[in-house]
Image: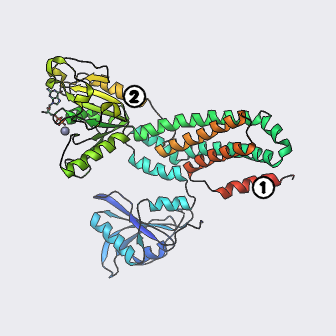
């Protein structure tokens, strides 16, 4: 148990919103058993991990539903606390009443992710595993789901922990050298430190490569799709997705806001951000939409500019700056690479440009779409058979890159024969970055380990 461990008992519906055969309300906390007993028509002792059939009642004794009660006493539960599941029928009104009945008995409605947070605080899982649960649920493809289950089962953490273990050993060696100044030079120049460092760099690089693949499967490629109304943006993304169209999410808002959709191309998730129209405007709401569009562009991997080729005169391709709908920003200043798509090529002749990748397609006839799909997979660095033993997020990639940077810096310190303290600092930074991934970073752990190691024989 941790000082941060919350004491109150939380409750929430664990199953997806909507109607279904079964719906589950989950309680977690010290009072879970008492609260569950209070909503049973006839209170009785709950045998751990045994399904009891019962009617559920509210505070007035009125029957809400009937179903199964399952008790998972801590610490052998998902959160590490006492957990009780009430499995009723999957109707939103029933489940809401059940939650309210639990709240009336003293439970608090759980915040988003709070069960997983408690599982993390109680050491039931580390951060990558907690994140993997969300990634598993969000996975849009089989490959992404497989990678996420790998992380949930600890594949990513094991790699990171193994690297951290080696870093700690190296730090102990270097810190020992610092403690004996008369021998420091020998310690650091005996070749072991340099050898261990370059081996670590190679291993961290390997983990980074795998993590990049895992992140690509999960997060895919983010594309901003821009172009004048009627250029064929919607038709194009329908045609690109083909039968693999996975999810259509229209973020609520005005038509001037941006729309997000996710399609997949041969298993590569592609997040499309449809900007409502980049043009100059006096309208305040529209200006806000444009501001968001530019924000989306800055966060994207690439911008897809769709042009109605049939509107171009004489098969002449104007400069890019004229194709971006009244862009208030120079094309050269765009923070992401551009792919130009000349749509409706069934009504026009093919053209090319020296300024950008150009694809002549017809969303209507399908002409040129295969080449565009291959191009998108290629810029994402995606192969059809892509698999990853674990999923990863941008946060993890950044942390691994930071660790790598610290190690490279350490190598330079060593080459420049800088003081051992400076190398020790780089190693500490690298370890801290890696431990941010699993959430294990605490200075005390490390001090303890170094201290106990130094005491031996000294
Ligand atoms: P958006 O406003 O950019 O999303 O454009 P839409 O996808 O709604 O398409 C506008 C119009 O162009 C529709 O009538 C489409 O049927 C038509 N259209 C889209 N793509 C093509 C194409 O490749 N060829 C032809 N001939 N018409 C197309
Ligand atoms: Zn459209």
Image quarter for ligand 1 equals top left
Disc 2 is placed on an element classified as helix
Residue at 30% x, 25% y: name it. 372
Looking at the image, residue 83 sits to the left or right of residue 265; the answer is: right
Q: Name the N-terminal-most of marks 2 and 1.
A: 2
Tell me the tag on residue 274.
none
Hey, which quadrant is residue 320 in on the image?
top left
In this rendering, the answer to whether 223 lies above or below 320 is: below
Q: 309 or 294: which is nearer to us?
A: 294
Question: In the rendered image, which residue does mark 1 sit on?
Answer: 452
Give the residue number, with chain letter if any, for mark 2: 379
Q: Bin the neighbour count of mark 2 within 10 Å (Cα to Cα): few under 14, some 14-19, many 20 and up.
A: few
Residue located at (78% from left, 38% from top)? 188
x, y (%) of residue 173? 77, 44
x, y (%) of residue 96?
Answer: 31, 68
Picture quadrant where residue 105 is located? bottom left
Q: Residues within 10 Å of mark 1 (few under 14, many from 20)?
A: few
Q: Element at badge 1?
A: helix
Whether disc 2's CB lies below 8 Å from ligand 1 is answered no
| 125 or 262: nearer the viewer | 262
């Amino acid at each position: 148990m941790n000082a941060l461990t919350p004491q109150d008992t939380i409750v929430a519906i664990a199953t997806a919103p909507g109607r279904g055969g079964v719906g589950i309300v989950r309680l977690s906390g010290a009072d879970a058993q008492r609260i569950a007993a209070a909503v049973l028509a006839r209170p009785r002792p709950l045998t751990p991990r045994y399904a009891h059939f019962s009617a559920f009642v509210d505070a007035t004794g009125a029957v809400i539903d009937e179903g199964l009660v399952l008790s998972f006493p801590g610490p052998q539960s998902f959160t590490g606390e006492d957990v009780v599941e009430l499995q009723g029928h999957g109707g939103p009104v029933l489940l809401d009443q059940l939650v309210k009945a639990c709240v009336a008995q003293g439970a608090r409605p759980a915040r988003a992710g709070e069960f997983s947070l408690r599982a993390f605080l109680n050491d039931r899982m580390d951060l990558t595993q907690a994140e993997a649960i969300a990634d598993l649920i969000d996975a849009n493809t089989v490959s992404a789901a497989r990678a996420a289950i790998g992380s949930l089962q600890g594949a990513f953490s094991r790699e990171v922990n193994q690297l951290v273990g080696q870093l700690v050993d190296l730090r102990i060696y270097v810190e020992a050298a610092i403690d004996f100044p008369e021998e420091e030079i020998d310690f650091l120049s005996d070749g072991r430190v340099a050898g261990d460092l370059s081996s670590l760099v190679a291993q961290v690089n390997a983990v980074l490569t795998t993590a990049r693949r895992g992140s690509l499967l999960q997060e895919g490629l983010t594309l901003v799709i821009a172009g004048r109304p009627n250029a064929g943006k919607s038709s194009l993304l329908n045609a690109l997705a083909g039968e693999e169209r996975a999810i259509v999410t229209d973020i609520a808002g005005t038509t001037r806001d941006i729309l997000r959709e996710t399609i997949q191309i041969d298993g590569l998730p592609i997040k499309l951000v449809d900007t409502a129209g980049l043009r100059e405007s006096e309208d305040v709401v529209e200006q806000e939409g444009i501001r968001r569009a530019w924000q989306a562009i800055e966060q994207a991997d690439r911008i897809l500019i769709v042009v109605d080729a049939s509107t171009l005169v004489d098969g002449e391709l104007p400069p890019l700056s004229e194709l971006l709908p009244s862009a208030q920003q120079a094309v050269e200043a765009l923070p992401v690479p551009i792919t130009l798509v000349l749509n409706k090529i069934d009504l026009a002749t093919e053209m090319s440009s020296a300024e950008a990748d150009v694809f002549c397609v017809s969303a209507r006839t399908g002409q040129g779409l295969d080449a565009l799909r291959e191009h998108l997979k290629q810029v994402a660095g995606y192969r059809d058979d892509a698999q990853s033993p674990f999923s990863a997020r941008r946060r993890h990639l950044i942390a691994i890159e930071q660790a790598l940077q610290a190690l490279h810096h350490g190598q330079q310190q060593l080459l420049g024969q800088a003081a051992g303290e400076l190398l020790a600092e780089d190693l500490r930074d690298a370890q801290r970055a890696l431990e941010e991934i699993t959430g294990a970073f605490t200075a005390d752990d490390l001090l303890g380990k170094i201290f106990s190691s130094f005491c031996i024989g000294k």
